[in-house]
Image: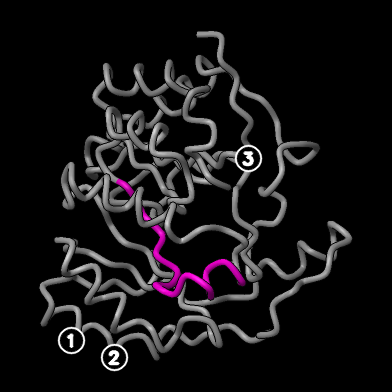
């Protein structure tokens, strides 16, 4: 293996990035600029990242295979946006597959269909972000194209909607009134599990460290308890709602 992706963190024994005990690999670089982003250091490939060989990465992930097997876990590629560097991790993904390590990929969906097609070959699960169903709002708050996201989402659904867990960051003043519509949208596409991720301000200090201004206006975290009201709504739609990752 000679490919060397850029990463900014590896978290072993992660429990909020897919089912079971997992190793979460955080890839550098993201096509979006969400105003509330909690990991601003992940947005650009540069001084906050390090390169790692696919061999080294696999060696780290393989250490905890017994825990994956026992708990139904595996490895999660996250970020940033992991699919930006999908071509750099193909040897790593091949090794995981040959070793029976389950692969999950967290994605914002603002990625080319070509990279989605590659991911479909390897991924057992996608943690797919749906931030809003409003095109103009999406562009205003993230800088991206909702059409691109929806194209990726529908392509994965056409393969197998059971491969997707929808993750919704619930952001005050942005999408908090949209949750019922997003649940309905997910149900129509055959999704059976959806995670509501309450807005938090844990990343605000990072902006100061980076010499950047935090652009989002809300400065108080959202109480997770207020999201429990959507659990019955999800159940009615045939969707398991989980609060948090």
Magenta-span inclusion, residue 206: no
Quote the CA–CA distance across marks 3 and 1: 37 Å
Q: Are the residues flagged by discs 3 and 1 in contact, CB closer than 8 Å?
A: no
Residue 116's quadrant in the figure? top left
In-image side of 75 versus 52 (left or right): left
Q: CA distance from mark 3 to mark 2?
A: 35 Å
Residue count near mark 2 (Cα–Cα under 10 Å), binned few <14, some 14–19, many ≥20 = few
Indicate the secondary structure of the residue bearing disc 3.
Answer: loop
Return the residue at label 2: 229
| Real-space Cα separation, disc 2 to disc 1, in angstroms | 7 Å
**Residues shaded magenta:** 126-140
Q: Residues within 10 Å of mark 3 (few under 14, many from 20)?
A: many
From the viewer's perspective, is residue 8 above or below residue 59?
Answer: below
Q: Earlier in the sequence, mark 3 or mark 2?
A: 3
Q: Quadrant of residue 63?
A: top left
Out of 240 and 64, give the one closest to the viewer.
240
Indicate which disc residue 232 carries.
Answer: 1
Is disc 2 placed on a helix, strand or loop?
helix
Q: Is residue 172 above or below residue 57?
A: below
Q: Quadrant of residue 233?
A: bottom left
User: Which one is nearer the viewer's eye here, 31 or 7?
Assistant: 31
Q: Contact, CB < 8 Å: mark 2 with mark 1?
A: yes
**Residue at the image point whose x is 42% and y is 58% from the top:** 147
Name the residue rendered at 76%, 41% in the picture.
48
Q: Which mark is residue 28?
A: 3
Q: In the image, what residue occupies the spot 70% across and 56% down? A: 40
């Amino acid at each position: 293996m000679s490919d060397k992706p850029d990463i900014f963190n590896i978290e072993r024994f992660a429990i909020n990035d897919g089912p079971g005990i997992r190793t979460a690999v955080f890839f550098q670089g993201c096509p979006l600029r969400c105003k509330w982003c909690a990991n601003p250091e992940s947005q650009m490939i540069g001084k906050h990242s390090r390169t790692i060989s696919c061999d080294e990465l696999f060696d780290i992930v393989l250490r905890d295979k017994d825990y994956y097997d026992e708990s139904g876990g595996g490895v999660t590629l996250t970020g940033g946006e992991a699919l930006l560097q999908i071509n750099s991790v193909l040897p790593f993904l091949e090794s995981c597959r040959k070793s029976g390590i389950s692969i999950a990929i967290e994605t914002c969906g603002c990625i080319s269909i070509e990279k989605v097609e590659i991911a479909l070959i390897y991924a057992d699960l996608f943690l797919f972000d749906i931030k809003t169903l409003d095109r103009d709002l999406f562009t205003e708050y993230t800088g991206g194209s909702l059409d691109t996201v929806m194209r990726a989402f529908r392509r994965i659904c056409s393969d197998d909607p059971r491969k997707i867990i929808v993750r919704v960051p619930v952001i005050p003043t942005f999408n908090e009134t949209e949750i019922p519509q997003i649940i309905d949208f997910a149900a129509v596409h055959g999704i059976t599990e959806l995670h509501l991720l309450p807005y938090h301000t844990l990343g605000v200090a990072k902006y100061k460290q980076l010499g950047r201004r935090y652009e989002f206006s809300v400065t108080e975290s959202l109480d997770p308890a207020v999201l429990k009201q959507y659990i019955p709504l999800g159940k009615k739609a045939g969707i398991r709602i989980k609060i948090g990752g």
